[in-house]
Amino acid sequence: MKTGKKILLVVLVFLLAVLLVLFAFVLYRMKGKASLEDHAAALAGEQQADMASLLARHAQEAEEAGSDVGKIPEEGQVAYHGNLYEYNDDLFTFLCLGVDSRQDIQKEKLPGKGGQADTIVLAVMDQKAKTLKMINISRDTMTKIRLYDTSGLFLYEEEAQLALQYAYGDGKEFSCELMEQAVSNLFYGIPIHGYAAIDVKAVASLNDAVGGVEVTVIEDLSRFMPELALGNTLTLTGRQALHYVQERQVETEELGANSLRMERQKQYLSAFIAKVKEQTRKDITLPVTLYSTASKHMITSITADQAVYLSTIALECTFYMEDMVSVRGTVEKQDVYEEFHIDEQALYDLIIQVFYRQVG
């Protein structure tokens, strides 16, 4: 065989291999999309109707208090401030948890030993509008959680800090499912399509995998690391990043130690997402690298094919600093711990804004 024909054959084989890989990727992506949509459909219907019913009850209470609702909603709709709204079924909503267990995430037999959910974020992706919003929820939020005994039997519900709900599970899937239900209940029954819980220790490795993340320090943490002095601008190393998102100065007399940490986490996460999007344009394998890096510290209900689909959509989504919001409320200091009490009206407005769309 002549050299020219050999080269042509090699090129054709290479092109065929590339086409097969692309075809497999497209099929895998389509499978992930179908899987997510099937799961979303399974959550729809009764759950969304219940959600609308709860929201409508709140709207009625607001009307009785003097707010003008105006229009009469149909089933599944909510009337608010004279307009009608319906749930936006183009959304995928995921619960993201940062778990501080001081060890790799693992199954625990005894309630209370699986760590606490120190970071609680709802990631809301609109696959049609190509937008991504993140809702930061205080770990100290007072809400109803489910308590279990040492044998894993349900005891009762009581009002406690949301972060503690994770501890009453097994430190893995059951803990995440308990958190998923508690957050959904807190948000008037919104559908949550999956969860991902990661131990905070993974922040160091993930930070280094993207080449570091630049921040301007917004709270003086020099007592932990001299470089983290207020106002200092630096590209964080993995160890610095871990301190920046994890430390909480509970020894101070000021209220809101966790709220200050949430602002740091919001700042860091926004910068991290921007860095990931920037680096992925240079190296399309980066999401795979990050997933592999995080895997031993993570538990998730999101399958590999779903992750492939979501990552392609996420790269197309717009995301700005203002797209990461915190649930508003007030902090009360108790003997040892702080309690965060949600502003119910502000939460209601946030739910309408993020999860609903106006009808007509």
Image: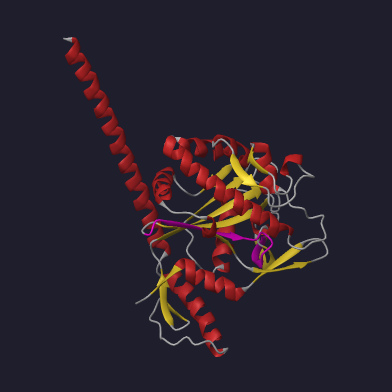
* Camera-nearest residue between 348 and 35: 348
Front residue of this view, candidates 170 and 140 = 140
- Residue 252: x and y in percent read 82, 57
Residue 260, magenta (yes or no): no
What residue sits 57% from the left and 39% below the top?
A: 206
Read off the magenta span: 129-147
How many tags in the picture?
0
* Residue 73 in picture, x, y percent from top left: 40, 82
Residue shown at 47%/44% (left/top)? 277
The image quadrant where one finds the C terminus is bottom left
> Between 274 and 114, which is closer to the camera in this rendering?
274
Residue drawn where x is 48% and y is 78% of the image: 53
**In the rendered view, how is the structure colored?**
secondary structure
Would residue 168 be seen by someone viewing this image from the given angle?
A: no
Q: Position of residue 344 (x, y in %)?
A: 60, 74
**Is 143 inside the magenta-drawn segment?**
yes
Q: Main secondary structure of the magenta part?
A: strand
Left or right: 277, with 340 as reference point: left
In this picture, residue 110 sits left or right of residue 10 = right
Residue 185 visible in the displayed image: yes
Q: Can you tell which quarter of the image residue 228 is in?
A: top right
Above or below, 88 relative to 111: below
Image point (71%, 53%), residue name = 112
User: In the rendering, at what x and y percent does residue 87 appear?
Assistant: 42, 70
Image vertical order of residue 279 relative to residue 176, above or below:
above
Image quarter (top left, top right, bottom left or bottom right) of the N terminus:
top left
